[in-house]
Image (tube, helix red, strand yellow):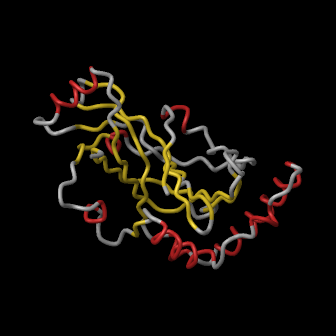
Amino acid sequence: MTTQKWYPIGLLLFLECSLLFFRGLPAYSQTTRSEGIQPLLQLSEQSIHSLLPLGVQPLINPEEIEPFLEKLEGRPPDWARLQHPNITEQSERLFDFNRKRDSTRANKEVILQQPVAFLWGGILRYYVPEHRGFSIALGPELTQTSWGIIRFKPVDLPNTLVAIPPPELRPSLLARHHAQESIEIIVVCIGTFIADESLIYGFSHDGDHAGMILPVVSVHTMLYILKP
């Protein structure tokens, strides 16, 4: 099951998706602005998978994510042993566990260097006449798997995110926008894992504080698809 939460892009870059611990990530260079300004695509009979370049591993649904995690990590964490009513103790357990997993993962560079694709959600915010397109607010996709909740964490996102619709679609989108309708899109992010800290294990604040895994991916390509 997949759910979405919406945040303004400026705020979203500072969120750790409600983890009960914080670990600083290294700074990475920003991608060029143009990479975030892309056509708004429409799917007819095509699938999202058909749009991916050759050699890209899709990590879109649990059936794709779980085998990949097993190949990379071996087995899921024992969430019950990591959890503790004392937040300080739980944070220390998570810190130690993450460091051990980072060390074990160090010899799996071939897997980590493979380009992967994952989904985030988005909404069209306001029209940008300069680009004849719409700015985008991003929101993470939370995917429930047997390993826990998966929430991809993209880094190196472009400063400017704009979806440019085809000319024949622009008038209807502008009319929907003026009517204050929420226009949802699918955002396909393609990139490679951050080698030193490619996965972060933690717990969500929501619901029953379920185990959560954040794969950290440096994004180099983005695709925008109008949600049916």
Residue 123 picture quarter: top left
Image position of 52 with respect to 9: above or below: below
Residue at left offset 44%, top offset 64% = 61
Frontmost residue, 156 versus 200? 200
Image quadrant in which you'd find residue 17 = top right
Nearest the eye: 35 or 71: 71
Q: Residue at x 81, y 53 (%)?
A: 91
Q: Position of residue 80 (x, y in %)?
A: 79, 65
Q: Residue furthest top?
A: 178
- Residue 182 at what x, y percent from top left? 35, 31
Kindly indicate the quadrant of the structure image that contains residue 166: top left
In percent of width and height, residue 35 lies at 33, 45
Q: Position of residue 66 (x, y in %)?
A: 53, 72
In the rendered view, does 78 fall on the left or right side of 57? right
Vertical comparison of 95 with 15: above or below: below
- Residue drawn 50% across and 46% down? 140
